[in-house]
Image: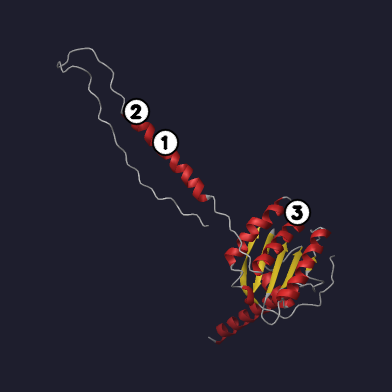
Amino acid sequence: MRRTQTVLILICLLMGLSSIVAVASSNFPSPIGFVNDFANIMDQQSKAAIEQIAITMQKEQGIEVAVVTIPTTEPLEPKEYAIKLFEQWGIGGPEDSGLLILVAWDEGRIEVEVGYGLEEPLPSGLVGAVLDQEVLGPFGEGEYGAGLLAGVQSFQKILAGEKYEIAAKKEGANWLFTFLVFLAIIVLFSSLNRRPPTNRTGSGTGTGGPRRTPPVVITTRTRFPSSGGGSSRGGFGGFGGGRSGGGGAGRSFR
């Protein structure tokens, strides 16, 4: 019994030690500004534009934005890396109003991490919509700096109180097209059933003309799905000790 307990304790200690080693081996870099292009995938113009937006947001709204590109997040998953990097850097001030946009190059992932203070204006669904509508398009064309700039601009407008329009999903249109094709097939068969039979020679009962097949009436009811509506470092003096609430969203870009 004691041997079993000893083995279990050793296993727990080893698991805890492996977690510590994994975090330590991640080697989180130190921030060099609001824009940290460690993977070297951004153009200078986009870097400078994002840096200026971040300075403005910090001064006027008290919001700290960090854009980070990293070659790899191994041995951590991109989401876990983003959470730990957010905590390590302390993005956001006393009100935890921080925003981290992390690009993990080898993993092909972009993760947006939101501080506690921004979880209400930036819910996960809205963050995901910004990634889908603003960021992934330029990423698909290899314009990573432009995609990140478009995302930061959208977040700035949302946090300034502007309404962000989420594009309607295409599933409703596809479903409607399928239904119309099905309805056309029904109408076609209905019209075929209405055709009179051909005259036949031979003995008959003397009833006169050919008999007609009574029309077939088809009533179809359906419900349509509703549709849902380096960089310039001036002004950077480090982050303010904010915490992440684990909110945000992530997407694969390849």
Q: Is residue 67 left or right of residue 204?
A: right
**Mark toward the start of the polypeptide (1 vs 3):** 3
Amino acid residing under circle 3: Glu
Res. 184 mark: 1
Please state, as top left, top right, bottom left or bottom right, where the C terminus lies in the image: bottom right
Res. 143 mark: 3
Which residue is drawn at the image coordinates 48% and 42% (left, top)? 177
Above or below: residue 207 compared with residue 127: above
Residue 254 visible in the picture: no
| Secondary element type, mark 2 | helix
| Secondary element type, mark 1 | helix
Res. 150 mark: none
Q: Which residue is mark 2?
A: 192
Which residue is drawn at the image coordinates 67% and 65% (left, top)? 157
Which residue is drawn at the image coordinates 67% and 55% (left, top)? 136
How far apart are the alpha carbons under marks 2 and 1?
Answer: 13 Å
How far apart are the alpha carbons under marks 3 and 2?
Answer: 56 Å
Amino acid residing under circle 2: Leu
Query: At which x and y percent is residue 192?
Result: 34, 28
Q: Is residue 71 left or right of residue 219?
A: right
Above or below: residue 192 compared with residue 220: above
Above or below: residue 174 compared with residue 79: above
